[in-house]
Image (cartoon, rainbow, N blue to C red):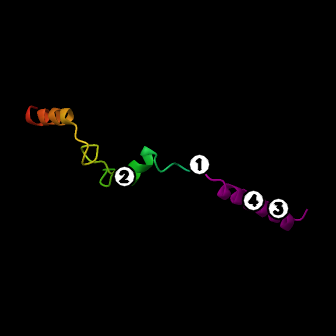
């Protein structure tokens, strides 16, 4: 085999290896992964959940829970 033919074979082999490694991908992480969310927003300035404090709608009032919360605020 001539030197040019050996160089061609080595170049083709390197190209196939490079193309094979470029096509393989790591498993995609889920967006709900806490690590991914922490890297994107480390100080949690924009939380994804729209939760209100009461945990319910306008008509959902829990008297005992309100009493307990007020007790914790006024009597620490």
Which numbered mark, 1 or 4, is in the foreground of this view?
1
* First in residue order: circle 1 vs circle 2: 1
Q: Does the magenta stretch include residue 71?
A: no
Query: x, y (%) of residue 51?
Result: 30, 48
Cα gap from disc 3 to disc 2, whole angstroms: 53 Å
The label shown at residue 9 is 3
Query: x, y (%) of residue 2?
Result: 89, 65
Residue occupying the far bottom of the picture: 4
User: For the N terminus, which image quadrant?
Assistant: bottom right
- CB under 8 Å between discs 1 and 4: no
The label shown at residue 68 is none
* First in residue order: circle 3 vs circle 2: 3
Q: Give the range drawn in magenta.
A: 1-26
Q: Residue under circle 2?
A: 48
Instruction: Check the image and report above or below for 35 versus 70.
Output: below
Cα gap from disc 1 to disc 4, whole angstroms: 22 Å
Query: x, y (%) of residue 38?
Result: 38, 48
Q: Residue under circle 4?
A: 16
Give me the residue at 80% from left, 64% from top. Answer: 7
* First in residue order: circle 1 vs circle 3: 3
| Circle 3 residues within 10 Å: few <14, some 14–19, many ≥20 | few
The label shown at residue 27 is 1
């Amino acid at each position: 085999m001539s030197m040019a033919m050996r160089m061609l074979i080595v170049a083709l082999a390197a190209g196939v290896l490079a193309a094979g490694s470029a096509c393989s991908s790591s498993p995609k992480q889920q967006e709900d992964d806490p690590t991914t969310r922490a890297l994107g927003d480390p100080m949690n300035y924009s939380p994804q959940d729209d939760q209100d404090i009461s945990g319910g709608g306008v008509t959902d009032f829990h008297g005992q829970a309100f009493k307990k919360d007020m007790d914790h605020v006024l009597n620490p």
